[in-house]
Image (cartoon, rainbow, N blue to C red):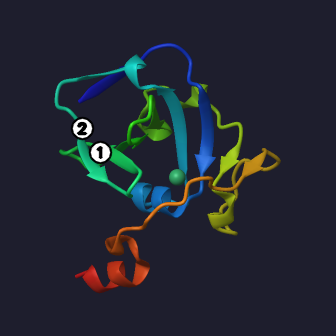
Amino acid sequence: MRYCAEGMPRSVHYCHCRICRHATGGPFAVLVWFEKDDVQWSGQLPSVHRSSDIAQRGFCGTCGAPLFLHYLGGETIALMAGSLDEPERFAPDHHYGVESRLRWSDCGAGLPEEETQERVYMPAGWAPSRLQRDLP
Ligand SMILES: [Zn+2]
């Protein structure tokens, strides 16, 4: 699967929200926001998971790599920086979701910080206790 994003991103930032942590399996996501229409997919299309009542996440159905975040009905799409061919070119310039930031997560010191603005319903499957119970 390939994608091509045209132009420059609207925004590049760390996201420390709990849903991004679950979606990436890491302490935060680095999101690179483009207009949805400026991202073209080719080959196999991403698999999509509804990660909350307001957003969906795309990932590769073959290898499981996280690819994007999209707010339902929104005109933008956030590509996961690690999925870019040249992520070095797109440095984050602020932190988002800082109320959920892990204290040991040491990145982007001195950048502006913003708390999560969205209030989302967390599907029961995301609860840590549930996840632990479901592990083999
Ligand atoms: Zn997030």
**Circle number at residue 17:** none
Q: Residue 76 appears at what percent x and percent y?
A: 46, 30
Query: Residue drawn 49% across and 26% down?
Result: 34
Question: Badge 2 is on which residue?
Answer: 46
Q: For the residue labelled by badge 2, is the local secondary structure a helix, a strand or a loop? A: loop
Question: Badge 1 is on which residue?
Answer: 59
The answer to whether 11 appears left or right of 2 in the picture is right
Going by the numbered disc 2, the residue's amino acid type is Pro
Query: Residue drawn 26% across and 81% down?
Result: 134
| Distance in Å between CA atoms under marks 2 and 1 | 5 Å
Q: For the residue labelled by badge 1, is the local secondary structure a helix, a strand or a loop? A: strand
Query: Residue drawn 71% across and 36% down?
Result: 93
The answer to whether 44 appears left or right of 129 in the picture is left
The answer to whether 1 appears left or right of 34 in the picture is left
Q: Residues within 10 Å of mark 2 (few under 14, many from 20)?
A: many
- Looking at the rendering, in which quadrant would you find the N terminus? top left
Taking depth in this image into account, of 109 and 70 the one nearest to the observer is 70
Q: Is residue 57 above or below residue 25?
A: above
Contact check, label 2 and label 1, Cβ < 8 Å: yes
Q: Is residue 21 above or below residue 41?
A: below
